[in-house]
Amino acid sequence: MISVDARPHPYLLDPAHTALVVIDMQRDFIEKGGFGDSLGNDVGRLEAIIPVVAGLIALFRKQGWPIVHTREAHKPDLSDCPPSKIRRGNPSLKIGDEGPMGRLLVRGEPGNQIVDRLAPLAGEIVIDKPGKGMFWATGLEAMLAERGITHLVFAGVTTEVCVQTSMREANDRGFECLLVEDATESYFPEFKASAIEMIVAQGGIVGWVAPLAALEMAAEKQVSHA
Ligand code: TIU
């Protein structure tokens, strides 16, 4: 076990059973002309965390720990997208409509891809999820079980929507969850701060929170003790 300096108390990371989950770092949320932009959000806030997420991914690759990338993505016929989700928010462009980067939130479209700087490598798991949470209708639970994963480290966007939903789903399934606070972002800074406080309150009711530097320091110590 490696001890990570985290809130509300140290997070004990089990190196042989830990995976990183990078939630929805897609052009659809991070670039102008995508789904996030269509909902009226300032997407620049999200772009700013790309270097930290890249650093976190690099740490996991260096350690040889598994990485899961998720994309919020629907089938081209939208058969996996409830009409309520399409209607929600009264956006300028709806899910499935043609935007400047192709059809919004549709699998395979240019805007639905993970941003180039965080592109998955061969051998890393990539999940298309039709919901906000990463377990609903994805088969991810079985993939993690096959690999003996018990600990999940979270990053990505947005903190209070897909990251928090996925982390809560994982918590209910028995995973020990850590959110890397500088590798996640929201369109609303106050929602990011509140989501983090909700996670760590009550003795870590949902899990732990730590900055990337704390994880890097813990991983280094592990190497120097080896
Ligand atoms: N990935 C994710 O968080 N999907 C969203 O729709 N987030 C918003 O904050 N809208």
Image (cartoon, rainbow, N blue to C red):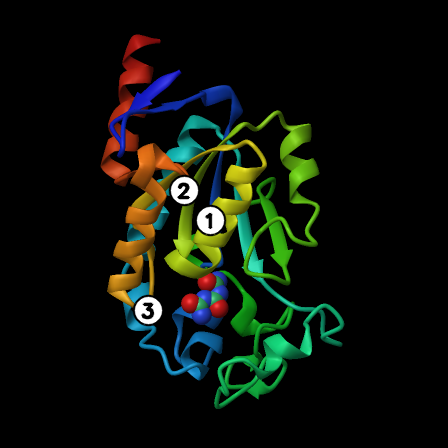
Task: Report the mark closest to the observer, 2 or 3.
Answer: 3
* Type of amino acid under label 2: Ile
Within 10 angstroms of label 3, few (less than 14), some, or many (20 or more) residues? many
Nearest-to-viewer mark from 1 and 3: 3
152 or 212: which is nearer to us?
152
Which class describes the residues within 10 Å of circle 1: few (<14), some (14-19), or many (20+)?
A: many
Real-space Cα separation, disc 2 to disc 1, in angstroms: 8 Å
Q: Which residue is mark 3?
A: 187
Q: Are marks 2 and 1 in contact (CB under 8 Å)?
A: yes
Earlier sequence position, callout 2 versus callout 1: 1
Work out which residue is located at the far front of the displayed protein and give it: 202
Ranked by sequence position, the earlier of labels 2 and 3 is 2
Residue 40 point in image, percent of width and height: 38, 83
Where's residue 125, x and y in %?
A: 60, 44
**Type of amino acid under label 3:** Tyr
Pointer 2 residue: 57
Residue on which the image places disc 1 = 22
Where's residue 13, x and y in %? 40, 24
Q: Is mark 3 within 8 Å of ligand 1?
A: yes
| Residue displayed at 72% across by 75% down | 78
Position above or below: 58 against 94: above
- Disc 2 element: helix
Instruction: Give the alpha-carbon distance from disc 1 to disc 3, as whole Å.
Output: 17 Å
